[in-house]
Amino acid sequence: MGGTIFNCVMIILGSGIGSLFKKGIKERYQEVVMQAMGLAATALGIHAIVKYMPISEYPVLFIVSLAIGGLVGEKLELEAKFKRLVQRFSKTNLAEGLSTAILLFCIGSLSILGPVEAALHGNYTYLITNGILDGMTSIVLATTFGVGIAFTAIVLFLWQGFFYLGALYMENYLTTELLAEISIIGGVLILASGLSILGIKKFNTINLLPSLIIPFLFFMGLHIFS
């Protein structure tokens, strides 16, 4: 888990540095940075979809996952509860920043394959590279949303910890096919987050997060009944 800890530390450091920049940046420049983050998230989402969609063996699975996951998230009111929790600590638009940061940091090949490689082969290259990238991204995010972006390090630790332990004890379930489906859904969520930041269309991306669980259940079912 050393690579994951490094990744989390980089996010915390980046958030601290970015928050210092935020204090010295005029509002109109913050708006430009916000637009840049929206465009970047949109581009990353499209990239993930285009990259993994052609290799998907179940091209309808992401649609079903988004539908079922969205219904579950809406029923549980995840978005509203998340915003209420964040507003206890901040009256700014931190909730939007955190939801975007969680998706950017957690949904990506490096963040998923990194802990798997570390667990199976002791290779920390992916996690170190991801940590450096996340550190730079957290600086930009904190410049826009504040030091609260550092809280995403907790979510990242749990996310990568799940894949680390999964690689150790559930190696048969963590197939390339499953990771591809997760990446497609993650790409859609990142794209939605980018469009929300740009003000094109407001999406409740937190309510869609349960969509990421559906592929796990689907592939576990295939493994059990095959």
Image (cartoon, rainbow, N blue to C red):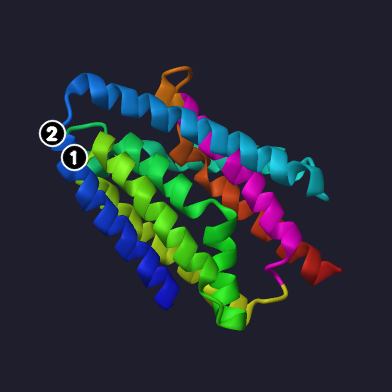
* 12 in relation to 197, above or below: below
Q: Is residue 22 left or right of residue 11?
A: left
Query: Which percent across, then down, holds residue 50?
Result: 71, 38
Q: Which residue is mark 2?
A: 24
Query: Which percent across, then down, holds residue 66?
Result: 62, 39
Near mark 2 (Cα within 10 A), the count class, few <14, some 14-19 or many ≥20, is few
Q: Which residue is mark 1?
A: 21
Residue at disc 1, secondary structure:
helix
Look at 13% across and 33% down and name the residue there.
Answer: 24
Query: Which percent across, then down, holds residue 32?
Result: 32, 23
Nearer to me, 154 or 61: 154
Mark 2 and mark 1: Cα distance apart in space:
5 Å
Q: Is residue 187 left or right of residue 17?
A: right
State whether the magenta stretch is mostly helix, strand or loop. Answer: helix
Residue 31 position by quadrant: top left
Nearer to me, 4 or 67: 4
* Region of the chain picked out in magenta, as a range: 173-195
Q: For the N terminus, which image quadrant? A: bottom left
Name the amino acid type tagged 2: Gly
Query: Which percent across, then down, holds residue 130?
Result: 47, 59
* 153 in relation to 69, above or below: below
Name the amino acid type tagged 1: Phe
Contact (Cβ within 8 Å) of mark 2 with mark 1: yes
Near mark 1 (Cα within 10 A), the count class, few <14, some 14-19 or many ≥20, is some
